[in-house]
Image (cartoon, grey):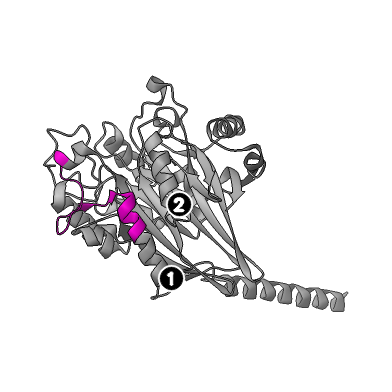
Amino acid sequence: MFHFRIKNRIVAFFSVLALLILFVSGIGCDKIESLTGTTAIKGASVKILFAGDTSFGENYRGSPKLLKKKGYDFPLEKIAPLLKTADFVVFNLETPITDIEKSPYEDEKAYCHWTHVDKAPKTFLKHGMTTFSLANNHGLDFGVPGLKQTIEVAQKSGMNIFGAGMTEAEAKKPFIKTFTVGKHSFKIAVIGAFEYSRSYDAKYSFYADGETSGVYKLSVDTIKEQIAEIRNSDPDAFVILYPHWGKNYKWKTKRQTKYAHRMLQDGGDLIIGHGGHSMQEIERYNDKWIVYGLGNFMFLSPGRYSKLKTKPFSYTAQLIVIEDGDKLEKRIRLHPIYSNNKKSKYQVRPLTDEEFVEFHQLLLEKSPLTKKERKRIRKGKDKGGHFVEFRI
């Protein structure tokens, strides 16, 4: 009996030791950031999540009280598991980060957004949301001083910003990052741009022009030149267009379709759009995919889903890159989320089983897909919730 106990203790000791070795060896391997901008991922895959319109909504009635009572983590609590599935997160920040008290446009513009200079960045970083585009219709809500402060806050906190700048050259600069996937390198170049609006140009001078500060204007001719420059620098770079476009609570417009087709013809690899506050279609064009509109991510406005009879569905788009022998396989995984704050009590969440069935049917019904393309879209569920997925 004594020898039996000793033997059991020895086996238990080495079992625990083995578990400790596995645990320690895994620490820091999932996401290792180097000074060169290369991300090493444990295993031969990387997941890059693209999220839509994001704002804590401090300028809306009710949101400041909610945030003061519940805290800045509260709106993201139910979507945190989805964020954790990603190795890297890119999102559209629909607000400047500023403590300037008065906007130069507050008497003219219906909604002028702002977010807390300390609490917002800390919350984003806590949830792995490190990189954002400011190329949207709220990026310059507090004028050039607000933009300048946003850039300074982002740099100070260690966040990456693109799609806006103090000059046109700075605003148009794409976000570029290289990931290590097994034995391969995978470089992305993400271009953030805001669809041209005559009123935003004339009334608010939103767009960067020469030495003038502002957000990057979506111009297919200029973007064609950008793509060519990227290709000259690195022919293997994966170019992603990340435009803010379309109409609120509507499906895609003819102009979105025209621009999307043109940008893929001109060398883009993937389009992931946002701006309409609700889901839009997907399309395969010239053997490349277009995700027309992500809708909202965590966007704390009351919303107009019920009033406009629009389904309160949005989604994120996760680019999954997997090492497959001597090549890299790429997939897009769409996680649908419920974005009606009035009914979700200002906590964005994954869809229920019943809601997902409706979302899936709606996506296939509205999207211009062939029967063959529809068959390529598979359904599944992971730690982030229900998803649909297709290969690029």
Residue at left offset 52%, top offset 48%: 289
Task: Note whether 366 is above or below 42 in the view shown.
Answer: above
Residue at left offset 30%, top offset 46%: 194
- Decide which of 280, 372 is in the foreground and name it: 372
Residue at left offset 52%, top offset 55%: 319
Q: Residues within 10 Å of mark 1 (few under 14, many from 20)?
A: few
Q: In which quarter of the image is residue 379?
A: top right
- Decide which of 90, 9 is in the foreground and name it: 90
Upstream in the sequence, badge 1 or badge 2? 1
Which secondary structure lies at badge 1?
loop
> Of tags 1 and 2, which is closer to the observer?
2
Q: Where is residue 388 in the image (x, y as percent from the top left)?
A: 59, 43
**Amino acid type of the residue tagged 2 in the rendering:** Leu
Residue at the spot of label 1: 234
**Amino acid type of the residue tagged 1 in the rendering:** Asp
Is 109 positioned to the left or the right of 296 in the image? left
Q: Split into 4 quadrants, where in the image is the N terminus?
A: bottom right
Is 383 positioned to the left or the right of 295 in the image? right
Residue range (magenta): 202-225
Q: Position of residue 273 (x, y in %)?
A: 41, 45
The alpha-carbon separation of the residues under discs 1 and 2 comes to: 17 Å
Q: How crowded is mark 2: few (under 14 residues within 10 Å), some or many (20 or more)?
A: many
Residue 273 at least partly seen: no
Residue at left offset 67%, top offset 70%: 325
Q: Does the magenta stretch include residue 40?
A: no
Q: Position of residue 134 (x, y in %)?
A: 29, 51
Residue at the spot of label 2: 264
Which secondary structure lies at badge 2?
helix
